Image (cartoon, rainbow, N blue to C red):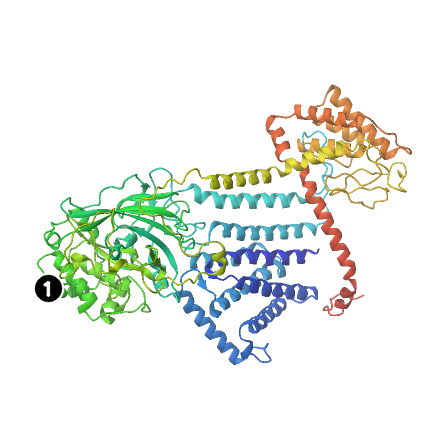
Amino acid sequence: MSGRVRLALCSYAATLMAAGALLPLVDPAGWMLQAAFLLALQSGVGALARRVPLAGALTMAVQALVSLLAITVVFVRDSAILWLLPGPEAFAQFGGLFGAGYDDVSRYAIPAPATDGIRLMLIGGVLVIGLAVDALAVTYRSAAPAGLPLLALYTVAAGLGGGGAGWLWFLLAASGYLLLLLAEGRDRLSAWGRVFGGAPPNRSRQGAGFEPGGAAHAPVRTGRRIGVVALGVALAVPAALPALDGGLFDGPGSGPGRGGGGGGTIAAVNPLVSLQDSLNQPQDREVLRYRTNAPDVQGMYLRIVALDRFDGTAWRSSERKVQGVPDRLPEPDGLSPAVGATEVRTNLSSAGSYKQSWLPMPYPATKVDIDGRWRYEPAGRTLVGDRGQTTGGVQYSVNSLVVRPTREQLAQAMAPQSELKREYTQVPDILPGSVKETALEVTKGSANDFERATKLQEWFAEDGGFTYNTQARSGTGVAAISRFLKQKEGFCVHFSFSMAAMARTLGIPARVAVGFTPGSPQSDGTMSVGLRDAHAWPELYFEGVGWTRFEPTPSRGSVPEYAQDQAPSGGATDPARPETGASAQPSTQPVAPDACPEHERRLGECGAAAPRDIGEQTDEGFPWRTVLLTGLSVVAGLLLLLLPLLWRISVRTRRLSAMGQASPKPGATSGPKGSKKWAGKGPGAVDPAGDGALAPAGADGVALVDDPAGTLAVWQEITDTAWDLGILPDESQTPRKAAARIVRLGKLTDEPAAAMHRTARAVEQVLYAPVPKAATGLADDAHLIRAGLRDGVNLRSRVRALLLPRSSVRVVWALSARWESLTARWALRRLPFDRWSALLRRPTKQRS
């Protein structure tokens, strides 16, 4: 295979491997097959253009033209001329598809549906990156800069996925880039011809006159090692430094918490990026299902995180310390025993496709039973996944309080502590004064903070003339708040952030909670929560009650009893006997239509599993399935690591058992005296006739020539044993000199040295005698030599020779030889085509 063809294949593979990072963004993934086919077409056209050959710029132009025609046929052939050539109508349709794709990307949550616009953006982007990589690495023979477009492709995937491209996709993309670099290194090295190296005979462990394929590929081996070390550093450093949150390898939501026991921090993240996308999904999709004994499920908001820092550009979650999840969570801040509170229990189950790091829970939670790597953030009373832990498919139980303060208790609340008030009433200096003026006007005549809060709520929900619209322009900064107060149109984000900001201007501590509304009841007594139940609401602090929920968004959620003008009577209910009311009756319409893609359905990620019944024992017995799967995984991993060892044992057994079993080939002769017939000269090749024609050997390096007693197999085993222990083979020497070299470097004495010389004489008999004499006892000599060589090295070298034998590279050599044989046969069949294509090549400046 020519160097440019090899580079083109590696360029194609590297682009596809980097494009794999885009797969989690869109569902279904059929677009990837189209992209792979069109990319192969583009690469093939480039290979043919370089074969002509054409100039580099002209090659790129031909590739770009063919890619444009292919894209036209796939997407806008109805508007194209002759269904192939793009005209004005086709380009207009391209513009419309790109515009629609841009809107779809900003509208849908991940994984987005594979609309025509999104498919065009994905496939077109892959082709553009593929053209850049192919031009740099193949046309202009500079593979190193080709990493930039590959990195750009991965970065786009990581950015759109909110950091969710995952370490596996990065590893795949990086491996493709390393493959491209190695292919270019091999191509450059081959241009210098074959390299022979002769090591000085007095240099211990370096006596390699000609190492088969080794000396010529030393720079390649060095590049491979550098690449592996660099990739290992890229993977290990982010994992070893707890402060590097939100890095390249963080999966969905893997960044906020890090570290072991009780330390670590939560990075400031904004979970509202996909809230509007969730509300605008064309079909709802179940993300949670729960069962609770709460008396009023309509107040069962599932809170994910609290955003408590307002810097003028957006509301964010502060960076705070996290700790291990305690057996029982601390008492809620500011809650007085005089306020009525009932503890309830809720069992929740998350859908496999719902993967994010913040755990949805009723507020305030008092106890959480969950498996996995979770950390607790005390200020927000939230749980966050650590080291890639997400909510995908988890089942957990939460004990929480249903706090029922009276209006009188809220109205008579004392002033909060100065430190808490100072932190949660901060507003940026750039907040327009009209915001505070509006808040003062709305709350005019109020006697206390609670009355001010309820008036703000009523103004947003009823009296202010606001309209709920999920298509409104999103934003949480001061500009978005000013625009919302002026246009009076938005969704929960606008209502909650605006009310929280106005409350802060009035001196009321406020923050914004993000999570889900209670969902819809099902016929089996559970509650189903879908993407469209995503919600944001303000929490205001009142001393003696703590953080208190309000609901300013019209037509969303439910207004708490204490925040209504006339609160219905009724006390707390025994948590063991949930009440049955209208709110708990099953709906007649499904709340979360089954819009799960087929591939997730097969993986069991559609919807949430049925949560445990209330009061059900959480001990599920011994986890036989987990233990079995873990055991099988460990066994498979060990077998993979032990493959070189197992191969070496198998080869040794086969070689030594060949003594006395091998028989001459029909019609074979031992050849003229002095002809070399043992394995060597490259990857397991032999020279049976002494005329320089190489004959192949097996994967174990044993020559497929006349060897009556298996002598050559034993010699090969001894050579490989010495190689495994650090004595590189020197096949430029005669058997007698090779034996003396092994005796010297291996420090063999007495019987092992005598056995080494006996074996060398037996090899000379097979190679040089007109009538070879069968040798006996060579297998025993091989065992004796092996024991002597092992005694001459340290324990580390013996373990290396056992687990990672150097001679196992013969497998790679054998595969390479077979591949070269196949390509040689293919080249013979391609000769007629080459003669025809020579007529199309551009003339050179040389004259005959």
Residue 287 point in image, percent of width and height: 38, 56
The residue singled out by tag 1 in the image is 444
Splitting the image into 4 quarters, where does residue 489 fall? bottom left
Q: Which SS class for mark 1?
A: loop
Q: Is residue 719 visible?
A: no
Apparent side of residue 446 relative to residue 609 in the rendered image (left or right): left
Between 616 and 763, the one nearer to me in the picture: 616
Q: Is residue 273 visible?
A: yes
Residue 500 point in image, percent of width and height: 22, 58
Between 35 and 597, the one nearer to me in the picture: 597
Screen quadrant of the C terminus: bottom right
> Residue at image x 47%, y 69%?
117
Q: Amino acid at mark 1?
A: Lys
| Tally of numbered tags | 1
Residue 473 point in image, percent of width and height: 32, 68
Between 681 and 440, the one nearer to me in the picture: 440
Residue 210 point in image, percent of width and height: 73, 39
Screen quadrant of the N terminus: bottom right
Residue neighbourhood size for the residue with mark 1, other residues' Cα within 10 Å, grouped as few (<14), some (14–19), many (≥20):
few
